[in-house]
Image (cartoon, rainbow, N blue to C red):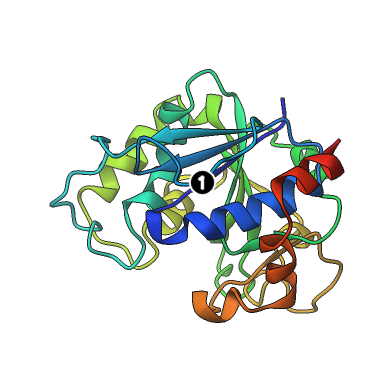
Amino acid sequence: MKQAAYCGTRAIYGDMETSAKSLIANSDVDAVHFIIEDSEFPSELPGIIECHDVSGQTFFPAGGPNMKSAYTYMAMMRVALCHVLEGVDKVLSLDADTIAVCNASGIWDVKMDGCYYAASEEWHRTMDGLQYCNHGVVLYDLDKMRDGKADECIEVLNRRRFPWVEQDVANYLCQGRIAKLPAKFNTNWWTNRNRGRTVIKHFAGVKAREWRKLPEVVKWRETTWDEVMAIHG
């Protein structure tokens, strides 16, 4: 199955819906998971979306060093997806500020070659042999993460503070086991200097109130779920 996941607090539930609409309409994804902090989602969703309440999560204690970061514990939940999504072997994780602008189905076919995940390199931070990738769009091999790497990432996040939280930790701990995701699947300033072909556009760095006014975003926010599912087929 081709599956995707979004992790978000209540503040970005609407953005998760908008992004998911674009992905579902522009791919053959079979299931989408919303990792949320409520027992129920506040609006009606189609059957293709399954919600997972992690409000009682125990992976990241309230007093942890990264819990007061601008990137909340819901961002860190990405490295725990292999535990939250039991039985799922591979999942595409996306930020809520991503829009699929054309058919993204090929992303699930990216070769993993025994790596923990596939992600697009940040050109300005990949140097001196260090591969550093942006985690706005990540294809995780959850079976591989269950070999202890997810638990290692969680342990380190609970011990030290990091500027880019789970992105920093996953990059550092998975060196040598990160597959390259073509930048067309995560096009933004950090991953694609030349602005080549775009499949998934990532509005990293754009403030939420500005992002919500962009034409590409308004289009999908105003598209109904019935219309999305009709396109998805």
Residue shown at the point (27%, 37%) measured from the top left:
59
Callout 1 crowding tier (Cα within 10 Å): few <14, some 14–19, many ≥20: few
Which of 157/52 is in front? 52
Q: Quadrant of residue 161?
A: bottom left
Label 1 secondary element: loop
Q: What residue type is labelled 1?
A: Ser
Q: Is residue 131 visible?
A: no
Residue ID at (64%, 72%) = 123
In this rendering, the answer to whether 220 lies above or below 152 is below
Residue 95 quadrant:
bottom right
The single residue placed furthest to the left in the displayed view is 63
Residue 203's x, y, as percent? 62, 72
Q: Which image quarter is the C terminus in?
A: top right
Q: Could you tell whether 178 is left or right of 157 in the image?
A: right
Q: How many labels does the image show?
A: 1
Identify the residue at the far top of this view: 87
The residue that appears at 59% across and 24% down in the rendered structure is 89
Name the quadrant of the N terminus. top right
| Residue at 71% over, 52% down | 224
Q: Quadrant of residue 67?
A: bottom left
The location of residue 74, given as percent across then percent down, is 37, 50
Q: Horizontally, is 157 left or right of 207 in the view?
A: left
Is 167 displayed left or right of 98 in the figure?
left
Residue 217 appears in the figure: yes
Q: Which of 114 and 215 is in front in this view?
A: 215
Q: Is residue 103 above or below residue 33?
A: below
Q: Which of 75 and 141 is in front in this view?
A: 75
Which one is in front, 222 or 103?
222
The residue wearing badge 1 is 43
Query: Residue 23 at what x, y percent from top left?
Result: 73, 49
Q: In this view, does 57 lie above or below 99?
A: above
Q: Position of residue 152 (x, y in %)?
A: 33, 37
